[in-house]
Amino acid sequence: FDLNRCIQKQIGEFARSAGGSFPVVFRSTGAQLIRGDEAQIREALRLLMTNAQEAMVAGGTITIEVGQVVLTEASAQGHPDARPGSYVTLTLSDTGGGITAEVLGQVFDPYFSTSGLAVKRGLGLAVAYGILRQSGGMIEAHSSVGTNTFFRMYFPALPPRPQPRRPAEPETILVVDD
């Protein structure tokens, strides 16, 4: 499926549920085809967007960028779950207050929450992690305290769909019947 269309649908749903109070900026380098369950990918995106919204208590902006990257043997070593190859990336960033290094190392752990059990169940990011792994992808988190946080998802890229061949100029077919 086309990841961009999936993201646009989810942004629309998020805007309705958030009451338009959190602007979402979306950028893409063009159609990006990935393999996976679109409903599950949308759920992972919803969980990340909700997490970003909750991190921006004073308001802010969510930015989603889609692109491509090729991981070589050397660059794949920097990602624990990576294999060399072409990937479609989805980066979601927020303008919240950031996450400390100690907390950042636990964000994908099930039931981990900084909000207390009465407020949170601590499953959102763990579920997003599981969805990405099930789709053959991976996710990583980066943050700077006081500035922002971003999550980058990697999906194995599919080759572009072949375009139907069209003749350069009109062709004539001659049929001879004996």
Image (cartoon, rainbow, N blue to C red):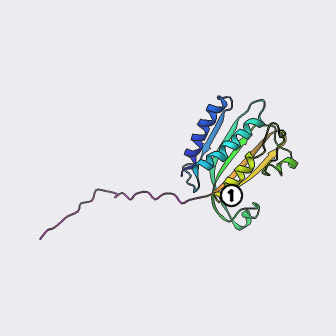
Q: Secondary structure at mark 1?
A: helix
- 57 to the left or right of 153: right
Residue 137 in percent (x, y) is at 66, 58
Residue 105 in percent (x, y) is at 83, 52
Q: Residues within 10 Å of mark 1 (few under 14, many from 20)?
A: some
- 103 to the left or right of 49: right
Front position in the image: 111 or 155: 111
Residue ID at (34%, 57%): 168
Residue ID at (59%, 36%): 12
Residue 8: image quadrant is top right
Most extreme residue toward the front, as rendered?
Answer: 118
Task: Quadrant for the C terminus, please.
Answer: bottom left
Q: Is residue 108 magenta?
A: no
Residue 5 in percent (x, y) is at 55, 45
Front position in the image: 57 or 38: 38
Above or below: residue 64 compared with residue 173: above
Q: Mark 1: which amino acid?
A: Arg
Residue 98: image quadrant is top right
Above or below: residue 74 compared with residue 32: below
Count the labels in the image.
1
Label 1, on which residue? 133
Residue 121: image quadrant is top right
Q: Which residues are magenta?
A: 157-178
